[in-house]
Image: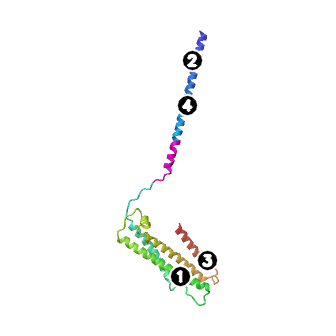
Amino acid sequence: GRHAARTARHCGAAHHTGSSRSQNLDSENISSLCSNSLLAMIHSALPALLHVAATPRAAPELALASHAADAAALFGNMQGTAALLTGGLVPLASFAGPKPQSSDSPNTARLKRLHMLVAWTSLVSELTAIMYATIARNVLLEAAVPHTHSLKELLLRGEYALAWTGVNSHFLFGLLGFVSTVSLNAWLSFGCNCAGGRIGPALACGASSALLLMLSVVNS
């Protein structure tokens, strides 16, 4: 009887251990299946998530509005600045420019002719910029201006694109010519072999470096 009871206990313990192991195996299988399913879902959804993240969002469309006043103010700024440069170019292109003399060397005579040419073309360019800005500003204040989404659209892609481009290009051309006349004046006034030593080349190089800096500002 004792042997039978002991055998029954051993069998019950073995059965309990077997059932526990089977339960553990079932739990491991279920966890493994869940992990694999989750990884498969993430793997399938990852390209779509990356595509959504990489797709740029469309910028909100701006409402149509009148930018005539702002455009007129910008043309007014260019008009005033061009008029200031014109005041400095008038004497350089007429009575205050270097006059050719019979004692000039061939190089000096060429530089004086170049000075007159640059000063004259710069003056005419600034006057053209003033004319563009004046006419465009008057039309902006007097006539009905179509509404646009932005001021940039009105000045670069609208009906005032030609006037805005003309003002900026002629203003910059005149400005660069004005700086060039300053450099030529410094070289012609002091030269290389005068009592001032090397002040002429120094002033000319300084004006030339300012000219290159202006070009870099425009390009930026």
Residue under pointer 4? 29
Q: CA distance from mark 3 to mark 2?
A: 109 Å
Residue under pointer 3? 202
The kind of secondary structure the magenta stretch mainly shows is helix
Residue under pointer 2? 12
Residue pictured at 58% horizontal, 75% vertical: 208
Q: CA distance from mark 1 to mark 4?
A: 92 Å
Q: Is residue 163 magenta?
A: no
Residue pictured at 55% horizontal, 33% vertical: 32
Disc 2 crowd rating (10 Å Cα; few below 14, some 14-19, many 20+) is: few
Residue pictured at 59% horizontal, 78% vertical: 204
Q: Earlier in the sequence, mark 2 or mark 1?
A: 2
Q: Earlier in the sequence, mark 2 or mark 4?
A: 2
Disc 1 crowd rating (10 Å Cα; few below 14, some 14-19, many 20+) is: some
Disc 3 crowd rating (10 Å Cα; few below 14, some 14-19, many 20+) is: some
Residue 141, horizontal then vertical, whole percent: 36, 71
Q: CA distance from mark 1 to mark 3?
A: 23 Å
Question: At numbered mark 1, what does the secondary structure look like: helix, strand or loop?
Answer: helix
Question: At numbered mark 2, what does the secondary structure look like: helix, strand or loop?
Answer: helix
* Residue type for callout 4: Asn
Q: Earlier in the sequence, mark 3 or mark 2?
A: 2
Q: Which residues are magenta?
A: 43-57
Residue pictured at 50% horizontal, 49% vertical: 51
Residue 49, horizontal then vertical, whole percent: 50, 46
Q: Are marks 1 and 3 in contact (CB under 8 Å)?
A: no
Question: At numbered mark 4, what does the secondary structure look like: helix, strand or loop?
Answer: helix
Q: Earlier in the sequence, mark 4 or mark 3?
A: 4
- Taking depth in this image into account, of 77 and 34 the one nearest to the observer is 34
Q: Check residue 117 in the rendering and tell me which mark sits there, or answer none.
A: 1
Q: Are marks 3 and 2 in contact (CB under 8 Å)?
A: no
* Residue type for callout 1: Leu
